């Protein structure tokens, strides 16, 4: 299984997430032509709909996408509400919300649960 990592924004958080994905046996490739999945990072910095659209525009068509929404906060208890605007993107395999502060993932149950969802998807795909 291969993955491709288009990044919308630079937070340092992406390295932590990709390291966890690589432990699950995924390989980072340099071309979307070589990938099976796209792991798209989207920093929510202005309005979620605009940020998600910018990320969508950077992703090549025809590949399943795991969309990782990154929310900048120091609050490990922050509530993340459903994103009705994400439904317009047909290629979405999974959307997760991660909390980060100053370039690092927050150590909290919410992030652990969301990261596990990503790892579960790769685990299912690898077993096929």
Image: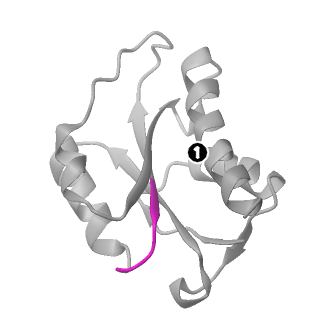
Magenta stretch: includes residue 52: no
Q: Which residue bears the numbered disc 1?
A: 13
Q: Nearer the viewer, residue 63 or 6?
A: 63
Q: Is residue 112 above or below residue 45?
A: above
* Outermost residue to the front: 128
Q: Is residue 35 above or below residue 37?
A: below
Estimate the x, y position of residue 54 in percent, counting from the top left: 24, 63
Estimate the x, y position of residue 40 in percent, counting from the top left: 46, 60
Magenta stretch: includes residue 63: yes
The structure residue drawn at horizontal position 39% and vertical position 34%, both measured from the top left corner, is 71
Quarter of the C terminus within the rendering: bottom right
Quarter location, residue 120: top right
The structure residue drawn at horizontal position 72% and vertical position 71%, both measured from the top left corner, is 1
* Outermost residue to the top: 77
How was the colour assigned to the protein in this rendering?
one colour
Residue 89 horizontal side relative to residue 7, left or right:
left
- Which residues are drawn in magenta? 61-66
Quarter location, residue 45: top left
Residue 40 horizontal side relative to residue 85, left or right:
right
Q: Are there few (<14), some (14-19), or many (20+) residues within 10 Å of tag 1? A: many
Estimate the x, y position of residue 88 in percent, counting from the top left: 18, 56
The structure residue drawn at horizontal position 57% and vertical position 87%, both measured from the top left corner, is 31
Estimate the x, y position of residue 81 in percent, counting from the top left: 28, 24
Q: Main secondary structure of the magenta part?
A: loop
The structure residue drawn at horizontal position 39% and vertical position 14%, both measured from the top left corner, is 78
Which secondary structure, mark 1?
helix
Q: Nearer the viewer, residue 13 or 66?
A: 66
Q: Nearer the viewer, residue 81 or 55?
A: 81
Quarter location, residue 90: bottom left
């Amino acid at each position: 299984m291969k993955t491709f990592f288009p990044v919308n924004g630079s937070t340092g958080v992406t390295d932590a997430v990709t390291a966890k994905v690589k432990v699950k046996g995924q390989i980072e490739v340099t071309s979307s032509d070589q990938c099976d999945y796209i792991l798209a990072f989207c920093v929510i910095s202005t309005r979620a709909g605009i940020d998600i659209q910018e990320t969508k525009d950077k992703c090549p068509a025809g590949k399943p996408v795991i969309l990782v929404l990154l929310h900048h906060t120091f609050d490990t208890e922050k509530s993340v509400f459903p994103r009705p605007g994400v439904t317009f993107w047909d290629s979405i395999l999974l959307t997760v919300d991660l909390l980060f502060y100053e370039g690092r993932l927050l150590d909290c149950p919410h992030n652990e649960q969301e990261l596990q969802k990503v790892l579960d998807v790769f685990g299912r795909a690898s077993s096929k």
